Amino acid sequence: MTLRRLIPTSLRLSTLGLRFVLIFLLARYLPVSDVGLYGLFTATVSYALYPLGFDFYTYATRQIMRGDRARWRVYITSQMAFAACLFIVMAPILVALFAAGLLPWSLVAWFFAILPLEYLGLEIDRLLIAMSDQLGASVVLFIGGAINPLTAIPLLWAVPGLRHLSTVLATWATYDVLALAVGTILIARLTAGANHPEVDWSWIRTGAKASLPFLAGTVCLRALFTADREVVKLFGDLSVLGAYTFYMSIGAGMTSVLYSGVQQFAYPRLVRSAHEHDSIAFKRHLRSLFLQTLGGIAGVSALTLAAEPILLDFVRDDTYRQYAWMLPVVLLVVAIYNLSIVPHYALYALDADRAILAITVISLLAFAITTAVFVHFNTVASVLAGIGVASAVLATGKSWNYLGQYRRHFRRQPY
């Protein structure tokens, strides 16, 4: 691994590690119900990001990776203008989440403070990666995602009076602002000399049409990882949701590790080789992505299972020990999901947006049916089974579809 790749990967893995530590500290110092509420809040923010951003980045980043560098500022300004319009439209709908009781009103101010900050931070990360500045993207992520735990952890440990959810949310928002400032400076430097920033509404309309299939697919996919918590809350309670959040957060670490160490470097190469109709390079990059993903899954799973007894001794609460059976199951379903990411990026590079949408919708239906059939037997097990079946549908459906898309795109002998 070269130094150019090692430093960004190390920063992202450090960020992930500190987020893990934060989750463990929350599990130790906060009531299980508060950990469940934290999981519900973060899942809702993550889900709301997608209709807010309209998945427009799928179009914008492809244009940046393929297009004229002189228009980068126009692309970015136009994307932010579109996002501002969407936020105005979405605000009343988001308020309805609190009116419906999905989240308590005590969190409404934090929600509307953190949501736009998270969106902007996420888009800066994507833009910097599309501009081939993985180091800058990782620095921004580290500021927003790692310094937050570095501040919150000592506060939770040293000051008992601050052991509540608002402390974590306050540090979250503070460092999101700092990360946004640094990211803005980095993008301004990378786009120096580009055309004067202006809003290109015709480009926005074209991008919105191109992004719509991705938005629908992403909303379905994120519904999968938001509905799971809602089902656990509905048929269980906040204590069960707290344990579920704890183990799913550990499982989500696998996805973060793979994105940080593998995917962020691989998918721009796939996009470029597909754009250049270089089938040899495309197959080489895709094979490398698959093998590295497989190795990452094996390594993360082994380390996590080995560390489980230590983690349970640290958090102490018997609720987590009662649901310890969840961890290997979570790792299995998350592993299947991450394998589905390999053909997903291949289809993305080949502009197979509608195929991605169709398969994602089918996977959501598979989740709903599986969970509904088994939910009255065991709530948590039914949800995990639903995610596992949905992930298997994603992996098999996208892999099968990729074979046809590859042949059509390169018009050569089958892969």
Image (cartoon, grey):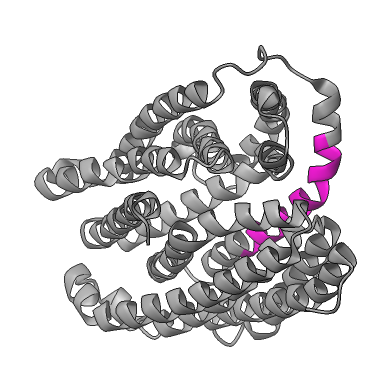
Quadrant of res 359: bottom right
| Picture layout, residue 117 above or below residue 315 | above
* 196 or 340: nearer the viewer: 196
Residue furthest top as drawn: 196
At x 39%, y 33%, the residue is 173
Q: Confirm whether the magenta stretch covers residue 339.
A: no
Q: Position of residue 201 (x, y in %)?
A: 82, 21
At x 71%, y 14%, the residue is 198
* 352 or 386: nearer the viewer: 352
At x 37%, y 78%, the residue is 299
Most prominent secondary structure in the magenta stretch? helix
Q: Confirm whether the magenta stretch covers residue 211.
A: yes
Q: Position of residue 339 (x, y in %)?
A: 59, 75
| Picture layout, residue 397 above or below residue 108 | below
| Picture layout, residue 298 above or below residue 90 | below
Q: Quadrant of the N terminus?
A: bottom left
Specify whether residue 148 is in view: yes
* 338 or 48: nearer the viewer: 338
Q: Position of residue 360 (x, y in %)?
A: 75, 66
Left or right? Give the position of 7 relative to 347. Answer: left
Left or right? Give the position of 244 relative to 403. Answer: left
Q: Which residues are magenta?
A: 207-224
Quadrant of res 63: top right
Left or right? Give the position of 104 relative to 169. Answer: right
Q: Position of residue 102 (x, y in %)?
A: 57, 50
At x 45%, y 27%, the residue is 186
